[in-house]
Image: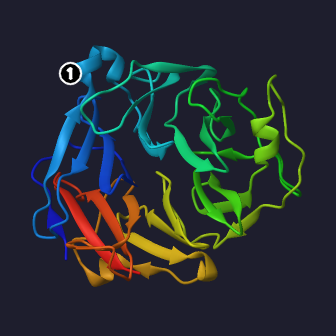
């Protein structure tokens, strides 16, 4: 059942995560503000998110022309964004909090300028941040990492067997599959690629690296059936993964790694499940309202389609 949230400032794309027992989301508002929200209860009929407008704390430094990203790392919630508005490139900056009340000063990832939004992942005790190089699209995907959220490796590219250096038209997405950190990206509007990435090369990069060794092969999935201009959301649990795509006509579809050739069109099940933006997704243990019950629940939050600017929730039992 779809649920409308209490308020919305026309987010362009939403990102969700599950941290410290709560669902968190972040988005860029129509006024380019970086907004963070925390779901204040587990009642499925009471969809109220406590809102934190980072512009109130940081002023114009907490504004961006691109969607932010968030993730839990070492028991803290981190928010990343491109620190500029308009078409200008900007540094990737970030802040963190434990509870939404106290926030650290804004920090900058040195040597990483982009015109695109960041993508984030954690794996093997490291925090990874990726975005596109400051060049014409499709642009090279650059990835940096840290084990302390303070000092970062030099941004590196990824090269795969049988494929030139990975380039994309939008920020990549990450998941963990087969005990490897795996990246999804698209060089064209209708083709999605996936491949494990060379985390060893990224973590060890103290100087700029042009290309990592082409250790893995990139897999092309369902060419022609994944037409999207905004990218994909990925969630994973226990060696299972789900990919959620907003198609060019606004339909929201979902598929699993075991059968990318078969998509479930959520718009067929719920006519209002349409959006013009990327969907935010996360997995929580149990159902809303029943802590630690099984099975788990996939939570989707998205902006409506067309003139419908409200935020909506959709729950899928896994």
| Residue 80 coordinates in the image, percent (x, y) | 45, 33
- Quadrant in which residue 191 is drawn: bottom right
What residue is shown at x 14% (from left), y 56% (from top)? Answer: 5
Q: Nearer the viewer, residue 251 or 288?
A: 288
Q: Is residue 171 visible?
A: no
Q: Is residue 202 visible?
A: yes
What residue is shown at x 29% (from left), y 66% (from top)? Answer: 274
- Quadrant in which residue 196 is drawn: bottom right
| Residue 295 coordinates in the image, percent (x, y) | 38, 82
Q: Nearer the viewer, residue 193 or 54?
A: 54
Residue 227 shown left or right of residue 97 in the figure: right
Q: Element type at marker 1?
A: helix
Residue 102 shown left or right of residue 118 in the figure: left
Q: Nearer the viewer, residue 116 or 174?
A: 174
What residue is shown at x 22% (from left), y 58% (from top)? Answer: 304
Residue 179 shown left or right of residue 224 in the figure: right
Quickly name the residue at label 1: 56
- Quadrant in which residue 4 is drawn: bottom left
| Residue 224 coordinates in the image, percent (x, y) | 60, 70
Considering the image in quadrants, where does the C terminus appear? Answer: bottom left
| Residue 133 coordinates in the image, percent (x, y) | 65, 31
What residue is shown at x 42% (from left), y 39% (from top)? Answer: 76
Residue 176 shown left or right of residue 180 in the figure: left
Q: Is residue 68 above or below residue 291?
A: above
Considering the image in quadrants, where does the N terminus appear? Answer: bottom left
């Amino acid at each position: 059942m779809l649920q409308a949230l209490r308020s919305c400032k026309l987010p362009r794309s939403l990102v969700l995560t599950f941290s410290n027992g709560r669902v968190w989301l972040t988005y860029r508002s129509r006024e380019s503000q970086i907004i963070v929200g925390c779901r204040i209860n587990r009642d499925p009929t009471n969809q109220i998110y406590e809102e934190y407008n980072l512009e109130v704390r940081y002023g114009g430094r907490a504004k961006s022309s691109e969607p932010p990203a968030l993730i839990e790392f070492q028991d803290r919630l981190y928010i990343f964004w491109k620190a500029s508005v308009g078409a200008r490139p900007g540094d990737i900056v970030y802040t963190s909090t434990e509870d939404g009340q106290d926030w650290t000063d804004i920090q900058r990832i040195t040597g990483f300028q982009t015109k695109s939004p960041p993508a984030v992942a954690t794996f093997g005790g490291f925090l990874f941040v990726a975005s596109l190089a400051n060049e014409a699209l499709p642009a090279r995907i650059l990835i940096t990492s840290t084990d302390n959220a303070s000092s970062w490796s030099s941004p590196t590219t990824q090269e795969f067997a049988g494929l030139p250096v990975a380039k994309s038209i939008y920020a990549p997405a990450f998941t963990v599959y087969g005990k490897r950190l795996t990246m999804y990206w698209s060089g064209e509007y209708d083709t999605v690629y996936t491949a494990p990435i060379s985390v060893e090369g990224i973590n060890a990069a103290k100087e700029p690296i042009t290309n990592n060794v082409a250790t893995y092969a990139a897999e092309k999935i369902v060419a022609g059936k994944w037409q999207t201009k905004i990218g994909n959301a990925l969630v994973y649990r226990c060696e299972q993964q789900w990919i959620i795509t907003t198609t060019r006509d606004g339909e929201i579809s979902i598929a699993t790694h075991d059968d990318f050739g078969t998509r479930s069109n959520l718009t067929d099940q719920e006519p209002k499940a349409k959006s013009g933006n990327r969907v935010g997704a996360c997995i929580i243990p149990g159902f809303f309202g029943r802590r630690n019950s099984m099975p788990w629940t996939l939570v989707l939050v998205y902006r409506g389609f067309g003139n419908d600017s409200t935020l909506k929730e959709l729950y899928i039992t896994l």
